[in-house]
Image (spheres, coloured by chain):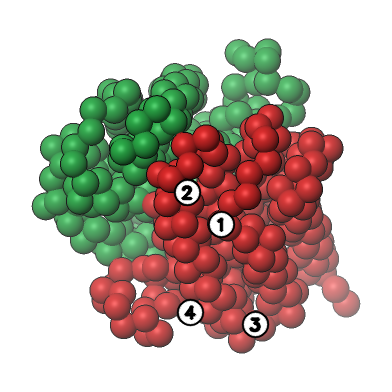
Chain colours: A green, B red
């Protein structure tokens, strides 16, 4: 027979999945809004933030209630703590989507400019990371989560390329400096969504394996990273 | 007589304070590095990140052990959960300091440019926010935390002003577009440190009052904010 505590854990998982769906939707809408210069979609992202914020609070309260209800076993405790951390990252994913929508709203006021950056491709990669991180959570599979950590390096390189190309554009074509800046900030916001997906993947691994992979995740594959310096969880400067 | 659990709580508090000191130091060093174009200080910030990451892990583990040790009372549970959230924000403050140091390292490669932005003043305001948020935590005072929430609006305005002025500079003086972009990103990073200080203040209030102020904090003072939409915890788009 299932206890009240176990039902509470299931409910917490369901709530987090819904929250994940909202965050993923927000990123997809923001990306599409950029591509189509679509103010209606921007507005949907802004309005969706309220729901995401409400969900974050509900999940934190549910986690708190479960911890207060009984002394959880270590594996359940790790699960509950992982949920609160993932929750916080999903809320920040929603914030990034709002930021992108705001940049799009700024861009739409100016003439469309042809810019050397493929936001559609970068956005698709980032959305895939969020989706896979949530799949890793649903299935409790560390291997899936590990794949997300590897994708983060690809997105980082896309953002670095975008930065280099867009700064060049700003130098050479002062008339589109503002559009280029908006695009650069959108690329940066997408890269930060990827960082949050990475955090989520690390929390899934922490939960499943009981090991803390944070700040060590990509050190081995990337010998150019100084020992002990994290690349995976750092929010990059540009 | 003090129980092992109570000693564990004290130890957790001490660990978090040390972590707070490291994060604060990182921001101060990064700001000073910008002002003096000082690569040595940049290097110190980069090296300090390792210690911050280690501390974050230790605090999470200590919190986990306390939760696993016995079933905490509601007030202790709220404290432990607040610590894990504050911990995560402090680590991200450290990340922002690293980002600033990286921008400074980029700027130093180019000729110094006179730019219409007062990073020193903005940095001082932001450092004060982090310091007060930690004081609110030490003293367990919601009023102190409330003051931090109000300071966040001031920093947001500074960042908006910096953005407007620096975009103008990029348009008018293409030869300093890269320096202006670096300064703009530093202003943005500082504003994000202020957001983390705000998060910390909200967690202190959650712990002290048992109320969740997140996503409601600045709605009342700012009637232009649509109901239910947060300004205080959102990481702004620029």
Q: Is residue A100 above or below residue B18?
A: above
* Lower sequence index among marks 2 and 1: 1
Give x and y (percent) for residue B159: 50, 61
Name the chain letter of the residue that bears numbered label 3.
B
Give x and y (percent) for residue B147: 59, 81
Residue bearing the label numbered 1: B116
Same chain for the residues at labels 3 and 4, yes or no?
yes
The residue depicted at 57 percent of the width and 63 percent of the height is B194
Q: Nearer the viewer, residue A68 or B84?
A: B84
**Left or right of B215 in this view: A223:** right
Q: Is residue A66 above or below residue B75?
A: above
**Left or right of A165 in this view: B96:** right
**CA–CA distance between discs 1 and 3?**
32 Å
Q: Say whether marks 2 and 1 touch (CB < 8 Å).
A: yes
**Left or right of A4 in this view: A40:** left
Q: Secondary structure at mark 1?
A: loop
In this rendering, which labeled residue sits more in front, label 3 or label 2? 2
Residue bearing the label numbered 3: B144
Residue bearing the label numbered 2: B169
The residue depicted at 79 percent of the width and 58 percent of the height is B21
In this rendering, which labeled residue sits more in front, label 1 or label 3? 1
Q: Secondary structure at mark 4?
A: loop
Give x and y (percent) for residue A131: 31, 32
Name the chain letter of the residue that bears numbered label 2.
B
**CA–CA distance between discs 2 and 4?**
45 Å
* Residue that sits furthest to the right in the current view: B1
* Lower sequence index among marks 1 and 3: 1
Same chain for the residues at labels 3 and 2, yes or no?
yes
Q: Is residue A78 above or below residue B147?
A: above
């Amino acid at each position: 027979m299932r206890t009240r505590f176990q039902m509470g854990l299931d409910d917490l998982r369901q709530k987090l999945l819904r929250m994940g769906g909202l965050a993923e939707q927000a990123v997809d809408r923001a990306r599409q809004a950029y591509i189509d210069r679509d103010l209606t979609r921007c507005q949907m992202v802004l309005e969706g933030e309220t729901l995401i914020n409400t969900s974050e609070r509900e999940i934190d309260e549910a986690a708190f209630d479960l911890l207060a209800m009984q002394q959880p076993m270590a594996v359940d405790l790790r699960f509950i703590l992982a949920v609160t951390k993932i929750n916080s990252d999903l809320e920040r994913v929603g914030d990034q989507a709002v930021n992108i929508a705001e940049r799009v709203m700024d861009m739409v006021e100016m003439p469309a400019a042809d810019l050397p950056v493929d936001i559609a491709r970068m956005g698709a990669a980032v959305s895939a990371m969020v989706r896979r991180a949530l799949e890793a959570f649903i299935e409790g599979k560390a291997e899936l989560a590990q794949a997300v950590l590897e994708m983060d390096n690809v997105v980082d390189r896309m953002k670095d390329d975008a930065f280099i190309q867009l700064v060049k554009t700003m130098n050479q074509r002062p008339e589109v400096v503002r559009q280029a800046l908006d695009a650069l900030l959108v690329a940066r916001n997408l890269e930060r969504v990827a960082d949050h997906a990475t955090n989520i993947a690390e929390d899934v691994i922490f939960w499943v394996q009981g090991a803390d992979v944070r700040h060590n995740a990509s050190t081995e594959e990337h010998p150019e990273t100084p020992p002990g310096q994290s690349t995976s969880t750092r929010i990059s400067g540009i």
